[in-house]
Image: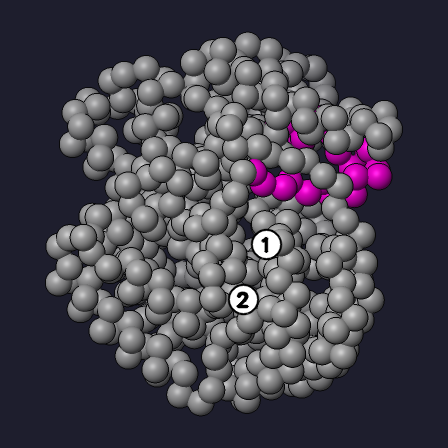
Amino acid sequence: MSDLVDTYLAHRFKWRPVDATFMGAEGHDHRLPPLEPGCIAAERAEIAALLEQVAADSAAHPHDRRMLRAELIVEQARLDSRPRQHNPAWLTGEAGFGVISLLLPQSAPWRTDAIAARLAAIPDFLADGRALLDDTPVPAGWVARAVAEAGVLALFLREDIRLHEAWDEAWAAPAAAAASAFDTFAASLAGQPDADPACGEAHLGLLLRELHELDLTPAEAMDAARAAFARCGEELEEMAREIEPGRSWQDQLAALAEVHPASAAEVPDSYRHWDAAARDAAEAHGLVTPERGYRLDYRALPPCFQRVAGPLYFLFYRSPPGLSAGQGSTYWIMAADDPAAHSTAMVKAIHAVHHGSVGHHTQNARARAAASRLGRIAATDCSMGLAFQGALTLVEGWACHVEDLLMEADDFYTPAEKLLLKSFERRNAASVLVDLGLHSGAWSMAECERFYAEEAGFAPARVHSEVVRNSMFPASRATYWLGVEGIRALRRRWTGSTRDFHDTLLSCGHVPLRLVEEEMAQAGCLS
């Protein structure tokens, strides 16, 4: 037996205790990350020691060793060049979700003392973070995001937290002090020197090679995505002609928004209906075994979270805490009182399939039985993204792949909804170009925004925030399309049934797709 994973998690939770809350680990809910002087060098020294332990450990599961090595190498490089502690949006995210994570259904029963402790810790945490940041140049988009998050979190702590069912008057004073600390932090960022958001080709190559275990160089990935973007555009035009000659695919997609529940009362039932229909269709057509034992509860977003949800990384579906998963998950229905916000096409493709039913929900349930311990928890949604971004090729690759997989179930999608799915594929190819183009230095932030708005067809209100997110997490958005392409390539080589392929794919848990390919090859399942 190996204690490698335990040693790593102790290290991880020491420096990122909010991750521990999201993963369901006990003993850290009262803390926020340490930010004392010298913390970056101290964490880096621990990583160097852990890398030696990974190299020497032959007893740990091979997937755990590979993922830990990659995670540590990449985190070491980040701490050298652009540590997370120098991102003001990481500071606001950790402070805000340090409290919010304890107010989500997955954290019940409510730990009022831990919530009070984290509220009380916010002023010192933000002050220490500001001192550590000092006058370090930071991309302007990251600063603007931090200021926006600080503003909405201050509002949440002054007003909306009181609407939570667990509200305790003992939180009033620390919540007020924390709200003032967010205001002070936001004001202090005025005049912060700007920095180039690109991570550079060397770091980008490291991420693709080590973290995601891809053979492609950034330039090769961009060439492939550019060809796919053009191909998808041609296919959209052809599909639109077949559905309704003389009407553009853009107009046909816009018309899908007009098909939605007739009233607010029907919105939750629409989600539940299509979730059940997707599971039944996948099973009846032998596509994948859907999860049925671990429940998914569709609920309207409570009033306490409604104003804070939009500006933050507040997800309608968040992966269950893998170390303490319970019997089911909650799926928030945003704007549940507005039926026009819930088009049937989007409910089916994004909510019922991509995230619910046979998408992330089934994927997360299967992951808990994976042989790799990290494979059970790597896709935990933390305050800004996945705990282990190296799993993205399989995690998001699967959820995007399964959207298209349901096209193999007769009559699940209408022809116009299949047109929507093709536009999703085109959008994912576009995101490869923006992600890798930005971080290789080929495109500026402004060029990325123009491409998203004018050529890729992103909603104008989403463009800026999407590019800022791309800038914070290099090579992450590219993995959606690259993951789907990798899964499709594996499926073409698979020698068994469709259902067995997808069930085997999910049985490995949240790991880089390359590790699944190796498992399948060793088992003699690939041609």
> Colour scheme used in the picture?
one colour
Q: Identify residue for label 2.
A: 29
Image coordinates of residue 440 in percent, x first then y, are: 40, 61
Q: Which residue in the structure is indicated by mark 1?
A: 107
Q: Is residue 6 above or below residue 175?
A: above
Q: Nearer the viewer, residue 209 or 267?
A: 267
Give the mark nearest the N terminus, 2 or 1. Answer: 2
Q: Quadrant of residue 50?
A: bottom left
Neighbours of disc 2 within 10 Å: few (<14), some (14-19), many (20+): many
Specify the segment rendered in magenta: 328-349
Q: Is residue 339 visible?
A: yes
Instruction: Please give the name of the residue rendered at 53% of the width and 73% of the height, measured from the top-left corner.
Output: 31
Identify the residue shown where x is 71% and y is 18%.
246
User: In the rendered structure, are the residues bearing label 2 and label 1 in contact, judged by CB atoms less than 8 Å apart?
Assistant: yes
Residue at the limit of the structure toward the right, as seen here: 263
- Disc 2 marks which amino acid? Asp
Residue 2: percent from the left, percent from the top? 20, 56
Classed neighbour count for the residue bearing mark 1: other residues with Cα under 10 Å, few (<14), some (14–19), many (≥20): some
Task: Classify the position of the C terminus by image quarter.
Answer: top left
Residue 342 within the magenta-colored segment of the rendering = yes
